[in-house]
Image (cartoon, grey):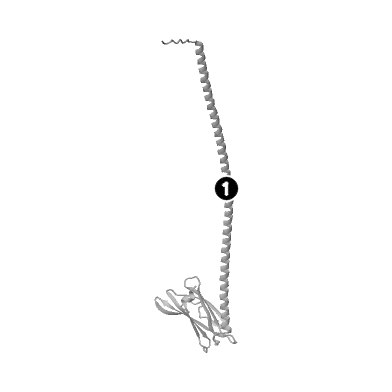
């Protein structure tokens, strides 16, 4: 046989239970809020720490970049100065080489002139021929710059050891082609200046100079010079010069 359970409803006890339940819920909420706030504080602190670390790293990187930039500027300045120095050295070397080349060229020209002078005086003092009649030592032709006009230089010599003067005249001829036909021009035909044929009179040597102009459509091939002593007792001396060799540079 079951026993009946009698439940006594106590309003005061019920109110205490509600109050304890509310208090417990409030404490739980406060605890949760506190934990949340504490977590935010720690998170904020961690962010600040991370920010400070990042800022320090940025400052370190910026300082390193500044140092690298400063070092590169110094190296660039040194390289620029080196380039300027090398360019200056190269220019000096080039100028020195040019001056040396010019000096050597002048020296070679002087030596060539000296050889000509030595040969010239040797021809007078120690001639290859014992004949004391005048002969051609040198003949040259050069253009004046005007079309068809040329200047000439003629040097006559004879051996030393005599007291009389050599006198006579020079006959000049030009062989060539005009309109495909071979012709020979005398002094009057190729505008020799002075207009008359040169004359000479010397004891050891003499230089004669003048100019001439070529006729139109005339192509010279050979320049002939004849030295004719006065009196008709000595034989004349004839020399022929290839035109291309006379006028080559």
The answer to whether residue 11 is visible is yes
x then y, percent, for residue 51: 55, 36
x then y, percent, for residue 210: 52, 76
x then y, percent, for residue 244: 46, 75
Q: Nearer the viewer, residue 80 or 196?
A: 80
The answer to whether residue 202 is visible is no
Q: Residue at x 58, y 76 (%)?
A: 114
Q: Which quarter of the figure has residue 34? A: top right
x then y, percent, for residue 236: 50, 86
**Residue lying farthest to the bottom in this orientation:** 233
Q: Which quarter of the figure has residue 131? A: bottom right
Q: Nearer the viewer, residue 20 or 201?
A: 20
The number of numbered badges drawn on the structure is 1
Crowdedness near tag 1: few (<14), some (14–19) or many (≥20) residues, C-alpha within 10 Å = few
| Residue 130 higher or lower than 64, as above or below | below
Q: Nearer the viewer, residue 141 or 66?
A: 66
Q: Nearer the viewer, residue 76 or 32?
A: 32
Q: Residue at x 55, y 28 (%)?
A: 38
Q: Quadrant of the image for the N terminus?
A: top left
Q: Which residue is mark 1?
A: 68
């Amino acid at each position: 046989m079951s026993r009946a359970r009698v439940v006594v409803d106590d309003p005061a006890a019920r109110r205490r239970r509600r109050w304890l339940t509310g208090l417990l819920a409030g404490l739980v909420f406060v605890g949760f809020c506190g934990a949340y706030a504490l977590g935010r504080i720690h998170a904020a602190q961690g962010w600040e720490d991370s920010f400070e670390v990042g800022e320090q790293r940025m400052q370190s990187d910026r300082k390193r970049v500044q140092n690298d930039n400063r070092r590169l500027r110094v190296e660039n300045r040194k390289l620029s100065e080196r380039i300027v120095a090398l360019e200056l050295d190269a220019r000096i070397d080039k100028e020195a080489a040019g001056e040396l080349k010019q000096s050597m060229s002048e020296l070679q020209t002087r030596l060539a002139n000296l050889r000509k002078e030595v040969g010239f005086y040797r021809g007078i003092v120690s001639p290859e021929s014992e004949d004391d009649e005048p002969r051609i030592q040198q003949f040259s032709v050069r253009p004046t710059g005007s079309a068809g006009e040329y200047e000439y230089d003629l040097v006559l010599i004879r051996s030393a050891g005599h007291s009389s003067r050599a006198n006579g005249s020079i006959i000049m001829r030009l062989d060539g082609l005009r309109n495909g036909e071979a012709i020979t021009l005398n002094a009057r035909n190729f505008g020799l200046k002075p207009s008359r044929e040169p004359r000479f009179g010397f004891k050891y040597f003499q230089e004669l100079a003048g100019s001439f102009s070529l006729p139109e459509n005339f192509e010279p091939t050979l320049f002939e010079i004849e030295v004719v002593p006065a009196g008709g007792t000595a034989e004349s001396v004839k020399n022929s010069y290839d035109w291309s060799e006379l006028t080559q540079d």
